[in-house]
Amino acid sequence: MESKDNNLSGGGMRWRRAAGLFVFWCFFLHASEAQIRYSIPEEMKKGSLVGNVAQDLGLDLKRLRSGRARIVTGENVQYAELRADKGLLVVHERIDREQLCGDVTPCSFTFEILLENPMELHPVTIEVLDVNDNAPTFKNHYLQFEITESAALGSRFVLDNAHDADVDANGVQSYILTPSDHFLLKQHVNPGGRKYAEMVLQKALDREQQPRLSLKLVAVDGGNPQRSGTVNIEINILDANDNVPVFNQSLYKAKLIENSPKDTHVLTVNATDADSGSNGKVTYSFSKSNAEIADLFHIDEMTGCISVIKEIDYEKDKTIEFMVEAKDQGGLTDSTKVEIEVLDLNDNVPVLNVMSFTSPVSEDSPAGTTIGIMNVKDQDSGENGHVRCAIEGRVPFRMKSNVRNYFALVTDADLDRESVSEYNITVVASDAGSPPLSAERTFHLKVSDVNDNAPVFAVSFYRANLAENNSPGVSVLRVSAKDPDENQNARVSYMLEQGEIGGTPIASFVSVNAQSGVVSAVRSFDYERMKRLDFAVRAQDGGSPPLCSNVSVGVLIRDQNDNAPQVLYPVQPHAEMVPRSADAGYLVTKVVAVDVDSGQNAWLSYKVQHKFGGADRGALFEVGLHNGEMRTVRQVTDKDAVKQRLTVVVEDNGQPSRSATVAVNVALADGFPEVLRSEFADDFSEDYDDRLTFYLVSALAAVSFLFVACLLLIVSLKVYRWRRSRVLYRSDLPVIPYYPPRYCDTLGTAGTLPHVYNYEACAAAKSHVTNTQAVSQSLVSVDGADADVPHGGEQTSGSCSLMSTLVSQIRTLVSIYVCFQSLYHGEALFLY
């Protein structure tokens, strides 16, 4: 007994050392997959190292981080954790091999490491090695047998097997029976790999000597340290029953469709007993070694009919094996094996798990951009577990799959947020069963905006009218542009395009509000200087980079009646002379006026302003309403005054109208002398004499200056000649007198001017004044012509005296000039 314990302890030590080592790892390359396998003992602490994933997969840490590496477990518990920053795989949750796999060995769990951009899937399998952390246990606290005393030597009695949650070496390794006087313990292994024990009768029983036996069955595992479990065995010795039941088959097989309803018949076992009476009556039961079978099936103890009491799931149990015992009334038993094959049905709906989903997605994303990644699993097998994914409806998306059971939702066309800003994408996952089962998932995807649209004006050209003389800052019009983008990309601001009008920047004329688009006048406009204003306004959004568009704006300046008419003719002062013999309709003059306004503001009308407001029936003159011609209304009479003063009013057609006046002086006379004799002529001679006197005084001063200058020059020459002659007189040279030709003519005529010229000049001046007044019949009189002023005779006489003085001075200058010429040529005799 001690040696067995040592052997078990040594084996446990060897297993424990092996469990702590890294067993193996390998890569399986298929498309973008690389499979890794690790082995770790159960019950490792959280955070314990499992393996270096980055090194084993041949990936660098940058790829793990950029690919957003993560573990995909689906609905299973995540026992492992990936530390992408170091590329290590560590324990995330406590791993209990018995809870994870039960009796299944080897025990392992699988998950995938998923990387994106591009998508890669690397399956990882972790085998969980058993640790001896469970002791063998028996389902029952004690076992009871009834054995006839006539039981033959070698009779076998199957004992309950102990259950150890551990497996392999840590599971049940052996059984020990104490005491062992009557029975020998034999150990066997059932088809499921479990060890069980049988008591073999090796010594005949004698009920009269010992009617009851008490034994102990000890189950020992192979762990280090060893663990054990004990059950008490009570044996009641009965009277002789020397035949045991015998099954007609050593193995029963049947097929059962999963999810079969309750009470569905599976099969019937049959055993016979050669004894008679009560000793030959056989009852059936499930073997105590398969106690859990009683939860799934029911066996009729009298008939051996096995039926379903609970739905069987193919995904959990594909094959069910158990033992059935036949027992007679004497306690003799026989056992047989039953094997049931479970047939699969398409009873599992595909399960769609979303690994990642990106929303919103930019509208400028190219076709083929990954939106989401999904994993679809179906627990059925064969065609029932083959899954495909599709998208319902017509949307610019499609499903793409490069790895089995993994699907990527990608864009199939260019997106336009302005057309469709949101999508409801329904993904349907269906299997290939009959009938097929399907599951669907709806994704709500938003499309984010990109500044891909420029502002658009409502019209291609804006027109507006603005009255001249406007107030600076007045609103002219409002431009408006819309941008189909959103948020900042749709925020439109307005500004003037750079330009000039007549060399002046356009900003000096108008301005535009950046937010509202209201165009305002910067200055007051004058229609007579500027009739039209053309410029461009730019609308620019707030995107990056910004987009813009332009629109042309034309502002017409509307005329206002802000200018009075201007008289071009007659020029003030002005006078006209009308002969007394003039008939009615005689054209006296024509008033010409203009108005710089336009339209009806420039339509002019003419009329004579009368003294008493109304029309004068005895008026001699009238003016054409539209042509401004002044004509006589009737024939001139003697009663009509010589001097006529008319005021003509020129008025435009504006609202309110503006006007200008012009005074026209008309003289009724047949000749100019008559006009001179009239009071009307005083005005002209006074004005003319004033000007003439000014001109004559200026001329006289100039001539006097020249006269004095000439006298000084002549005296200088005379002195020079005299000194020269004295030099010649003192010499011995003869003096030859020189007489210039035509001296007498020069002396008599050319030397001096006639004395009567003074009187002729005066008369000529007066005649000139008279002729000037006769010619200037078209002069306009000045204001105040009707005022009384002294007669202009004295002024005229003074002017004649000045004229005579001026003429005398001129005669003297001419004589001096002739003398100067004679002296220059050596005519000395003339000087003496």
Image: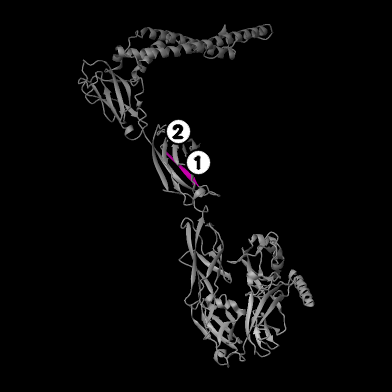
Quadrant of the image containing the C terminus: top right
**Type of amino acid under label 1:** Gly
Q: Nearer the viewer, residue 111 or 62?
A: 111
**Front-lying residue, 529 or 583:** 529
Q: Position of residue 642 (x, y in %)?
A: 26, 15
Residue 533 part of the magenta-drawn span: yes
Instruction: Measure how far apart labels 1 and 2 are at the Cα level.
Output: 17 Å
Q: Is residue 112 left or right of residue 392?
A: right
Where residue 550 appears, x then y in whole percent?
A: 47, 47
> x%, y% of residue 341?
56, 82
In which quadrant of the rendered view does residue 478 lie? top left
Pointer 2 residue: 523
Q: Is residue 43 above or below residue 153?
A: above
Q: Secondary structure at mark 2?
A: loop
Residue at point 42%, 14% (across, down) = 691
What's the mark number on residue 499?
1
Q: What segment is highlighted magenta in the picture?
A: 532-540
